[in-house]
Amino acid sequence: MELIKNLTEIYGPSGREEKIRSLIRAEIKKICKDTKVDALGNLIAYLPAKGKKNSKKLMFCAHMDEIGLIVKHIDNQGFIRFANVGGIFLEKILHHRVIFENGTIGVIGVESKPETPKPPQIDNYYIDIGARKLKEAEKMVKIGDIASFYQSTELTNNKIIAKALDDRIGCYCLIQAMRQIKKNSSELYFVFSAQEEVGLRGARTSAFGINPDYAIAVDVTGTGDTPESPRMAVGLGKGVAIKIMDSAFIAHPFIKEKLVSYAQRLKIPYQIEVLERGTTDAAVIQMTREGVLSGVISVPTRYIHSPNEVCDLSDVDSAIKLIVHSAEQGFE
Ligand code: CO
Ligand code: ZN
C-alpha cells in the first residue's frame, strides 16, 4: 500500500514525468539492471530470457503520466486560466486542489455571473493560488506550467481511493510483476510510457524502438456498477478485466484467448471488457511497423479522470497474477 500511495500521490502530468519516472526507476533498480529513458521520456526496463530461451520479444506497457491543467493566462488579480492536458471533465474538478511541479498549491474555482454559460466552459474556470496580484502570482507560477490534482491516497474497505490510479495502478502492477517473475522464455520489456493522456505518444516511439512480437498494455477501465452508469459488464471487485474492444482497439483474438486461458488456469476471477469510450497504449502499439499481436489487461476503476478514482485491491492482485503468468508463459 505504501508503494501505491507513493506512486499515486506524486506529481506527473503528461510531458512532466520526471518525478514519477525517478520514483519508478529507483523502485525497479533492484530488480532490473538494464533500464533506459528514451527521447520522449519513456522508462524502458529489459529482462532477458531465463531458462529455455526463444527469440520472441514481449512488451508490457503502463503509462506513468496523468491528466493535468496547463497555465495559459494569469490576470491582474493573480487568478490563473488554464487549458486541459488530456481528458479533463469540467464537472468533476470544481473546488478540488491542484499542485504545480514546484509545490505551489491552488484551488479550482468558477465564475458565477448570471451570464456565465451553463454548464460553464473551461474559460470560466480558474485556479486560485492565493496571490493578490499578477506580480505575486508570477513568482509562483508561469505560463506553460502544468498542475496535477493534489490528493491523498486512502485504503478503505479494500478499495483504493486516489488520483491518477489511471495509470499509476498499472505501473504498480508492472513493478510487482517484475519482482515475482521467475522463469521467462521470452525477452521481456517493461515500458512505463510518457504522454499517454495526450494521444498515446510515448507508446508509439517505445514500441517502434523495441519492435516487439507481442504486447500487453496494462491500464484502468470503466465499470458499469454505479447507479445509472452506462451499460457495461465490468464491476469493481469482480476480477481483472481482459479487454475485447475499446474505442480505438480490438484485441487480437489469439492474445485475448491466451489471457482468458491463463486466468482460468490460475483460478483467478476475470471479466470480459468492452469499453465504449477511451482507449490505451495498445491502440498504437498494435499498429507499429507491420503490426504487433496485442492485448490489454485492465483494472476496473470508477470515476476515471477525476481527483478521486476508486479501484479494488483484489482486482489489482488478480491483474498482477495474470501479468506474471503471461510473462513467464509468453504467447507462443
Ligand atoms: Co487516462
Ligand atoms: Zn490510462
Image (cartoon, rainbow, N blue to C red):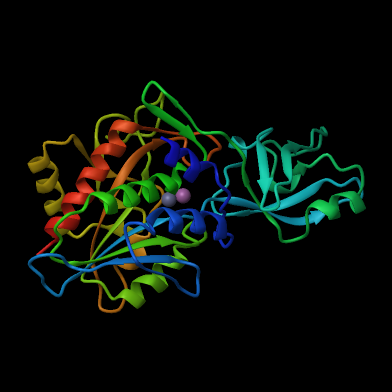
Q: Where is residue 114 drawn, in percent x and y?
A: 82, 32
Which quarter of the rendered picture does the C terminus lie within? Answer: bottom left
Q: Quadrant of residue 70?
A: bottom right
Residue at 83% x, 45% y is 79
> In front here: 78 or 34?
34
**Left or right relative to 27: residue 151:** right
Q: Where is residue 296 drawn, in percent x and y?
A: 27, 53
Q: Where is residue 250 drawn, in percent x and y?
A: 26, 57
> In front here: 172 or 85?
172
Question: Is residue 253 shown to the viewer in this render?
Answer: no
**Left or right relative to 216: residue 144:** right
**Left or right relative to 74: residue 44:** left
Residue at 41% x, 73% y is 205
Q: Quadrant of residue 89?
A: top right
215, above or below 309, in the image: below
7, above or below 255, in the image: above
Q: Residue furthest top?
A: 157
Residue at 43% x, 40% y is 4
Question: Is residue 103 shown to the viewer in this render?
Answer: yes
Q: Where is residue 48 drawn, in percent x and y?
A: 22, 69
> In front here: 141 or 304?
141
Tell me how many marks there are.
0
Which quarter of the rendered picture does the N terminus lie within? Answer: top left
**Left or right relative to 177: residue 35:** right
Residue at 34% x, 71% y is 207
